[in-house]
Amino acid sequence: MSSETAAPTSVSTHILDTCVGRPAEGVALTLSVRSGSDGAWTAHGASTTDADGRCKDLPDLPAGTTHVRLDFAVEEYFVSDRHSAAKEHSTHQQAEEQQDAPRVRDSGAFFPEVAITFAVQPGEHYHVPLLLNPFGYSVYRGS
């Protein structure tokens, strides 16, 4: 197959908020690419997760791409999500004084950004789901 007719190399992603068991809507992300382990990162696309937590509009990768980085801006998501929870929580002021509750909870998210870097091969599709909660995350190659 010639390079002109080769299948494009592509990336998609989605985010599930495992704390609430729902898709994470409205998370901004950027897609960067490089050629070779020592190559410079180049911004190649940006998107925001939809109501289903998915980004379906990321551009195909340029020829020669060997590595991809997805940078998720998750702090903004948790701050906005926490805003509505804080209102509900304010009606239970006495219950909020738990001795064993982690104080970092008040900062929005322990990981303000999540950067996922992975290697790619020409002509493949890479679906990279992010399972997210305020204190951790997991990622894998999906299908």
Image: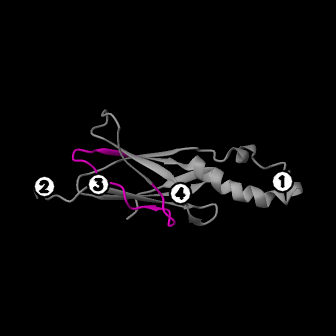
Three-letter amino acid code of the residue under disc 1: Glu
Three-letter amino acid code of the residue under disc 3: Asp
Residue occupying the point 35% across, 46% down: 68
Disc 2 or 4, which lies upstream in sequence?
2
Q: CA distance from mark 2 to mark 4?
A: 35 Å
Q: CA distance from mark 2 to mark 3?
A: 14 Å
Residue occupying the point 10% across, 55% down: 2
Can you identify the residue that label 1 sits on? Answer: 96
Front disc: 1 or 4: 4
Residue occupying the point 29% across, 54% down: 60
Residue occupying the point 27% across, 45% down: 65
Vertical relation: 37 (above or below) 66: above
Residue 6 seen in this snapshot: yes
Three-letter amino acid code of the residue under disc 4: Gly
Front disc: 3 or 4: 4
Numbered circle sitting on residue 60: 3
Magenta-drawn segment: 48-69
Vertical relation: 44 (above or below) 26: above
* Number of other residues with Cα within 10 Å of mark 3, as a class: few under 14, some 14 to 19, many 20 or more: some
